[in-house]
Each structure stands twice: as C-alpha cells, then as structure tokens.
Amino acid sequence: MILGMDITQIIIIIVVGGVAGWLASLIVRGGGMGLIGNIVLGIVGAIVAGWLLPKVGIIIGGTILGAIINALIGAIIVLLVIRLIRRA
C-alpha cells in the first residue's frame, strides 16, 4: 500500500485527476498534456486547490463531484501559472 491507501483509493485519485486534468486542458486552450500529463495535472491541481481554496474561504463538498471540481479549479490555476512561466 502507498501511504496507507488501498487500490480503490488509488484508482479514484487517478480517475479524478484524469477527469480534472482533461477538463482543465479543454478550458485553458493549448493546455493539453496527454493522458499521463492530465492525470498528474489533476492530482497536482487537487493538492493546490486543497491548500489554496480554504485559505480564501471556499469549501467544496466531500463528494466525488466536489473532488473533481476542487481538482479542476486547482488544475486550471496550475495551467495558467505554467502558461505565465512559459511566456516569461
């Protein structure tokens, strides 16, 4: 087990990350990174949003849809930051 997670939790993280990364790449044009890149983007986005959103007073529910929305917001933020860095 990775960090005390069972296989179901790992699969859920990968699916949520993939969906969020894919949706973020559709919203932020030119942000597509392929399947693995989108999964990583979604997972990193979930971490970023999980840290940032509560600090600004935004709390999203604990359902799977809430997890996807949270990861999507974070993934969009990450893609926009990457775009800014590439332009510099």
Image (cartoon, grey):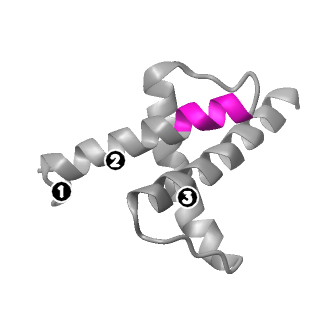
Residue 74 within the magenta-colored segment of the rendering: no
Q: For the view shown, which residue lies furthest in the right direction?
A: 88
Q: Are marks 2 and 1 in contact (CB under 8 Å)?
A: yes
- For numbered disc 3, what is the local secondary structure? helix
Front-most of residues 49 and 20: 20
Q: Is 51 rendered above or below residue 22?
A: below
**Residue 16 spot, x, y in % from top left:** 41, 45
- Dot 2 or dot 1, earlier in sequence: 1
Q: Nearer the viewer, mark 2 or mark 1?
A: 2
For badge 1, the amino acid type reads: Met
For badge 3, the amino acid type reads: Asn
**Residue 53 spot, x, y in % from top left:** 64, 69
- For numbered disc 2, what is the local secondary structure? helix
- Dot 2 or dot 3, earlier in sequence: 2
Q: Are marks 1 and 3 in contact (CB under 8 Å)?
A: no
In the figure, is residue 50 to the left or right of 39? right
Q: Is 81 rendered above or below residue 69?
A: above
- Dot 1 or dot 3, earlier in sequence: 1
Q: Which residue is pictured at 69% across the width and 38% down the height?
A: 79
First to last magenta residue range:
21-27
In the figure, is residue 27 to the left or right of 66? right
Q: Which residue is mark 1?
A: 5
Q: Which residue is mark 3?
A: 70
**Residue 11 spot, x, y in % from top left:** 25, 42
For badge 2, the amino acid type reads: Ile
Q: Which residue is pictured at 23% across the width and 52% down the height?
A: 9
Q: How far apart are labels 2 and 3 at the CA level? A: 12 Å
Q: Which residue is mark 2?
A: 13
In the figure, is residue 2 to the left or right of 54? left
Q: How far apart are labels 2 and 1 at the CA level? A: 10 Å
Q: Which residue is pictured at 52% across the width and 42% down the height?
A: 20
